[in-house]
């Protein structure tokens, strides 16, 4: 994995599940799956990133909600009523018996605009901080997906390599056990050599069984990310090289991490949002000035029927019928000034509460900054160490093989016993496992360093993918095991 200098890098789009990405997944080959294939499937299928995407979209609305308090508020209303009213009044000298039917319609539209409202302004600033924080958090979640996919993929390759060396070690010890039995049968070695070889073989068989179980578990971890059952992966080519990160000094990575680490950005924006919340609560006691404008119109139509009159002998009552048609409209403009005088102490309590939360966010920012510095230094040291270990582990394979040849030669002439040979054989296979493990340790430590520095992106997946070789088949089941 070629290391690169830290450079400003941003996540291209917060919406990972694009149409092009879906097309790439659909068009993926049916043979050995690569790191890129697994990543592109996980982008769509991983429930953790899907939940993070939904959270990002929800939290991004904070800006719009905060801005709403500064924008005009317009409302409209309409009503309709159909009423019947009957009046019956029978007295000694007057009679009235009327029925009124009326259809009434009314319309109104109102506009209000805040002219001076400091709490609303700081609430808007808080909304912007929360939206930016959501964006930074989603970028951190995207980086975390890249790291989780890489860890799961290379853990499979690690388990496969360990299984291969364990199985090869078991076969080599088995051949040594058979040769020892043959030599014992012709009287060349004592029975104790057979027992010792058998004990080492039994231990190797147990180790092979455990490694095959670890391989199946590693494949299952991929299924957690993608929701699919994977059978064959592409292995890491032997041409892969490990190099020290650039710049070589940790201070450069620390400085860059302080400027670009997404989790540190989240803590910083959360602190700013808490500060604006505290200001909004602090200014709740100030006057608020707003402008209100309204227009209303109403109409009533109907008819009134009935009889009425004075009760006199020989004088008939008068029947009447009249139409009702009333129209009215009006407009209003108001300047409203309000100022809380006493609210039971709730405003003071909310002001103190928000101030304490702002202090909490400030302390969290300090902790995040310190953790970022420590993580950058630790990750840088881990990369430097693993880069050196790759070369050392590769050389240890050559040394172990040379030692095995010398021990076998000594065993043939009688200067070494079977235990020496078995120990030398185990050293060779242990050196091979250590070398494979160190290569994967280097890759993951480099990715963690880039994550701390805010540089980890899908490009790193694609660069790593170029080192993979589909002909190096990594299967769910090992040679000696079954799925």
Image: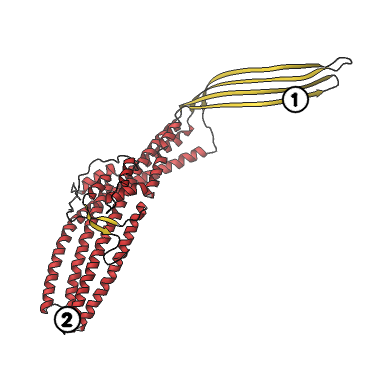
Which residue is disc 1 drawn over?
A: 86
Please determine whether, in this image, residue 189 is positioned above or below residue 371.
below
> Taking 404 as reference, is 28 left or right?
right
Please determine whether, in this image, residue 431 is positioned above or below residue 358.
below
Residue at the farthest front position:
30
Image quadrant assignment for residue 55 = top left
Residue at the farthest bottom position:
187
Which residue is disc 2 drawn over?
A: 183
Residue in the image at 27% along x and 74% along y: 202
Measure how far apart labels 2 and 1 are at the Cα level: 125 Å
Q: Nearer the viewer, residue 332 or 389?
A: 389
- Residue 478 point in image, percent of width and height: 27, 64
- Residue 76 point in image, percent of width and height: 54, 26
Q: Nearer the viewer, residue 161 or 273?
A: 161
Q: Disc 2 on helix, strand or loop? A: helix
Residue in the image at 22% along x and 58% along y: 438
Question: Which image quarter is the C terminus in?
Answer: bottom left
Q: Disc 1 on helix, strand or loop? A: strand
Q: Which mark is residue 1?
A: none
- Residue 10 point in image, percent of width and height: 28, 40
- Crowdedness of circle 2 by 10 Å Cα count: few (<14), some, many (20+)? some
| Disc nearest the viewer among 2 and 1 | 2
Q: Nearer the viewer, residue 151 or 73?
A: 151
Mark closest to the chain's N terminus, 2 or 1: 1
- Residue 139 point in image, percent of width and height: 33, 43
Image quadrant assignment for residue 316 = top right
Residue in the image at 23% along x and 60% along y: 437
């Amino acid at each position: 994995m070629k290391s690169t200098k830290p450079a400003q890098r941003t996540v291209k789009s917060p919406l990972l599940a694009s149409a092009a990405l879906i097309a790439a997944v659909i068009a993926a080959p049916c043979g050995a799956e690569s790191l890129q294939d697994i990543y592109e499937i996980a982008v769509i299928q991983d429930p953790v990133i899907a939940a993070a995407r939904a959270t990002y979209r929800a939290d991004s609305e904070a800006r719009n909600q905060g801005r709403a308090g500064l924008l005009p508020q317009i409302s409209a209303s309409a009503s309709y009523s159909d009423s019947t009213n009957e009046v019956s009044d029978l007295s000694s000298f007057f009679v009235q018996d009327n029925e009124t039917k009326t259809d009434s319609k009314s319309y109104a539209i109102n506009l209000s605009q805040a002219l001076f409202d400091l709490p609303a302004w700081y609430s808007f600033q808080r909304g912007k901080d929360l939206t930016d924080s959501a964006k930074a958090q989603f970028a951190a979640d995207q980086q975390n997906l890249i790291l989780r996919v890489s860890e799961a993929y290379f853990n499979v390759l690690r388990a496969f390599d360990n299984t291969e060396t364990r199985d090869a070690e078991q076969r080599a010890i088995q051949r040594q056990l058979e040769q020892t039995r043959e030599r014992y049968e012709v009287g060349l070695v004592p029975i104790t050599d057979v027992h010792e070889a058998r004990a080492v073989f039994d231990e190797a068989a147990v180790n092979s069984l455990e490694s095959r179980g670890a391989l199946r578990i590693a494949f299952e971890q991929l299924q957690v990310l993608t929701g699919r059952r994977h059978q064959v992966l592409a292995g890491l080519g032997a041409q892969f090289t490990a190099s020290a990160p650039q710049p070589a000094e940790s201070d450069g990575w620390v400085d860059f991490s302080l400027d670009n680490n997404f989790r540190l950005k989240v803590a910083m924006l959360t602190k700013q949002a808490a500060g604006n919340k505290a200001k909004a609560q602090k200014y709740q006691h100030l006057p608020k000035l707003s402008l209100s404008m309204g227009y209303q119109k109403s109409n009533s139509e109907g008819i009134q029927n009935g009889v009425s009159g004075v009760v006199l002998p020989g004088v008939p009552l008068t029947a009447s019928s009249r139409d009702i048609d009333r129209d009215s409209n009006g407009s209003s403009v108001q300047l409203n000034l309000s100022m809380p005088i006493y609210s039971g102490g709730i405003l003071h309590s909310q002001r103190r509460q928000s101030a304490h939360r702002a202090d909490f966010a400030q302390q969290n920012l300090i902790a995040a900054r310190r953790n970022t510095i420590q993580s950058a230094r630790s990750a840088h040291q881990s990369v430097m160490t693993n880069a050196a270990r790759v070369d050392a582990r590769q050389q240890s394979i050559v040394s172990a093989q040379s030692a095995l040849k010398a021990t076998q030669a000594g065993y043939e002439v009688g200067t070494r016993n079977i235990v020496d040979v078995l120990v030398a054989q185990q050293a060779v296979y242990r050196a091979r496992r250590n070398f494979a493990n160190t290569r994967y340790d280097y890759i993951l430590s480099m990715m963690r360093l880039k994550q701390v520095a805010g540089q980890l992106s899908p490009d790193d997946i694609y660069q790593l993918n170029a080192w993979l070789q589909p002909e190096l088949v990594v299967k769910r089941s090992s040679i000696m095991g079954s799925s």
